[in-house]
Image (cartoon, rainbow, N blue to C red):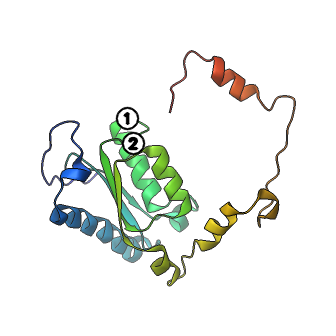
Amino acid sequence: MRRKTVRSTPEGSNVAMTLTAREHSDWMAIAIHEAVENVHHVHGGPFGAIVVKDGEIIGIGRNHVTALNDPTAHAEVQAIREACRYLNDFQLRGCTLYTSCEPCPMCIGAIYWARPDAVYFACTKEEAANIGFDDQFIYEEIALPMTQRTIPMKQMRTAQSLLPFQAWRTSTDKIEY
């Protein structure tokens, strides 16, 4: 993995709050570069993201939806996965995510589960919609009752439905998240 160190900070410091505007701009330039390279060399979507911790890039992501035939392979998700592997943790506390575009609903969910300290984005979702990446319908679908969504979503209860939750509640080996 390529890493770039801009500066060191004391362990546990909040990098997102202590960086200068110039340093944020430098990190964003890298995320944007990843997006452009992805278009030219992978023929993927125009999206790139990086995760930074203590002045070091610990995760790089490019949109690989079509390259991997994986609708979840968005740049932010790829960067989060790589950073979590690097940290050997499922959370990104103390980290900052820089992304070339405002995250879509799926990526927003992944970001909240990963819990970075901050997210910075360059282009807006409206600018993405102008080139054919329109997520507005997903925002609208989420707001609808399940019975009115385009893709039918129906609860299906069985006698075993609650078994996984009961196992979790009584587990002594669980890791809360």
Q: CA distance from mark 1 to mark 2?
A: 6 Å
Q: Residues within 10 Å of mark 1 (few under 14, many from 20)?
A: few
Residue 32 occupies quadrant: bottom left
Q: Amino acid at mark 1?
A: Asn
Q: Amino acid at mark 2?
A: Cys
Question: How many marks overall?
Answer: 2
Residue visible at 42% across and 45% down in the picture = 115
Q: Which mark is residue 65?
A: none
Q: Residues within 10 Å of mark 2 (few under 14, many from 20)?
A: some
Depth check: 165 or 77 in front?
A: 165
Residue visible at 35% across and 41% down in the picture = 93
Say whether residue 159 is left or right of residue 76: right
Note whether 58 is above or below 104 in the view shown.
Answer: above
Note whether 110 is above or below 43 in the view shown.
Answer: above
Say whether residue 126 is left or right of residue 60: right
Is there any visible trace of residue 157 in the rendered image?
A: yes
Please tell me whether mark 1 sits on a helix, a strand or a loop. Answer: loop
Note whether 122 is above or below 85 in the view shown.
Answer: below
* Residue contact at pointers 1 and 2, CB within 8 angstroms: yes
Return the residue at label 2: 84
Return the residue at label 1: 88
Please tell me whether mark 2 sits on a helix, a strand or a loop. Answer: helix
Depth check: 35 or 16 in front?
A: 16
Measured as percent of width and height from the top left, residue 98 is found at: 33, 60
Is there any visible trace of residue 56 in the rendered image?
A: no
Note whether 71 is above or below 55 in the view shown.
Answer: below
Residue visible at 66% across and 68% down in the picture = 140
Measured as percent of width and height from the top left, residue 34 is found at: 33, 67
Measured as percent of width and height from the top left, residue 6 is found at: 14, 55
Residue visible at 39% across and 42% down in the picture = 84
